[in-house]
Amino acid sequence: MACFLKYPKYCDYPIENLPYGVFSTPSNPSHRIGVAIADVILDLSQVAHLFTGPELNRYQNVFKEATLNNFMALNPKAWKEARETIQSLLSVNNTSLQNDAHLQSRAFIPQSDAIMHLPAKIGDYTDFYSSIHHATNVGSMFRSRESALMPNWKYLPVGYHGRASSVVISGTPIHRPHGQILLADGTPPVFGTSKLMDFELEMAFFVGGSTKFGEPIPIQSAHEHVFGFVIMNDWSARDIQKWEYVPLGPFTAKNLGTSISPWVVTTFALKPFIVDNYSQDPEPLPYLKHSDNYNFDISLQVDITPKGTNVSTTVCRSNFKYLYWTVKQQLAHHTITGCNVNPGDLMGSGTISGDTSDSFGSLLELSWKGTKPLTLLDGSQRKFLADGDTVTMKAVCEGDSYNIGFGTCVGTLLPAIVR
Ligand SMILES: *[C@@H]1O[C@H](CO)[C@@H](O)[C@H](O)[C@H]1NC(C)=O
Ligand SMILES: *[C@@H]1O[C@H](CO)[C@@H](O)[C@H](O)[C@H]1NC(C)=O
Ligand SMILES: *[C@@H]1O[C@H](CO)[C@@H](O)[C@H](O)[C@H]1NC(C)=O
Ligand SMILES: *[C@@H]1O[C@H](CO)[C@@H](O)[C@H](O)[C@H]1NC(C)=O
């Protein structure tokens, strides 16, 4: 597949990728849908009239909206046609855009000029807990190695209904939160700022299509509702979490902000990077059993950059493929009760840890509850995040002839707001 734009072989956004996002520019503040290609954005609102295939000719307006929700609401056939149309418009063999300098000047925007926004209006956000290594590590710290996994863990993809209103786009600063903290067992809690701020390395997928209230999504067709993936940082206040999470799970320790990367990488782009599912023992119950591989080889990395330095330290290298539960299983379980889903719903994976100590996806695990501080390259030490730390998460599928990049999910932890 040859693109008429030139770019380095292993850039994040080759013609095989084509992730969708929502952007604006300083000279045009309206939010538009675009596709990342090389180091530019193809503004789909400018080329909507070129989507003339049988699936999309009646739906060209979905490319002129301020969010991806109505495009996500279509179906895999329409998404595939959109991808093929964009690929042919960008191909060396097609002259429609290549030979139209006027259209190009309106339709191509340098990524460096763009301000990125949330790709969709997120109606509902659910976060799973699907990494066996993460769940085992956390369970070992707070219970014991033997009873690290709760008895339900290998039977169902554990998750909780999170807060959609505080999901923010990469680049949004996060303030250290206030809350209740228990300093010692048997004493009353104190009110103060969290001292144990953490990141959680996650990925999340956007739901495509919708289901009716009362209709579960059958596992065999669950992939038809997976539109695409982003990187997610589920910022967590560990001290607040520890006091509040029993009996109903995370609450204010997690609603202080959840960051996502701006470009939604579609499942079409991920196809060449499908790998075997994580092997499951015991065998899942029938409603959670599927016969196809639906796991992805996506390299993940987390860097910390302290304030006032330009020195970044990679603190974690992990991979999406370490997840125990597939996203098909997550969707089938989520909806088994008849719970409906909507286009633009966001489903987080849970922290993605591998089985080695350099692949743990949170500082809680990396510093083993603060008992093993990390030394960063600037010489400073971390048990948890310090004010001014910038956390950068990267994700990329590394292929033989091209990469599929997700870009980055970035956020800086700012001091608590004095109220
Ligand atoms: C472009 O056309 C040539 C032949 O004219 C063909 O070999 C090649 O596969 C085409 N490339 C694309 C991207 O369609
Ligand atoms: C270019 O691709 C578009 C979208 O697939 C198609 O409608 C158009 O006919 C093609 N134009 C040329 C000149 O090949
Ligand atoms: C995952 O893929 C394997 C084949 O590699 C298959 O046997 C298994 O049933 C699939 N599904 C699950 C849930 O493991
Ligand atoms: C970090 O790098 C930027 C740009 O390269 C430079 O302007 C700034 O002075 C540097 N800061 C420090 C603390 O080295």
Image (cartoon, rainbow, N blue to C red):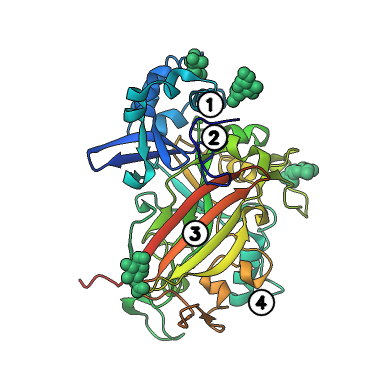
Q: Which mark is residue 144?
A: 4
Tell me the SS state at disc 3: strand
Secondary structure beneath dot 1 equals loop
Amino acid, disc 2: Ile
User: On the image, numbered disc 2 is attached to which residue?
Assistant: 15
Q: Where is residue 330? Give x, y as percent.
A: 60, 46
Residue at the disc numbered 1: 91
Mark 3 or mark 1, earlier in chain = 1
Q: Nearer the viewer, residue 273 or 284?
A: 273
Can I make out residue 299 in this image? yes
Task: Specify the quadrant that holds the N terminus.
Answer: top right
Q: Position of residue 254 (x, y in %)?
A: 42, 62
Secondary element at image label 4? loop
Report how far apart the C-alphas of labels 2 and 4 lie in the structure: 48 Å
Query: Quick check: marks 2 and 1 in contact, CB under 8 Å?
Result: yes
* Residue type at the position of mark 3: Met
Between disc 2 and disc 1, the foreground one is: 1
Q: Is mark 1 within 8 Å of ligand 1?
A: yes
Left or right of 261 on screen, residue 222 = right
Q: Nearer the viewer, mark 3 or mark 1?
A: 1
Residue 355 or residue 241, whichever sits in front: 355
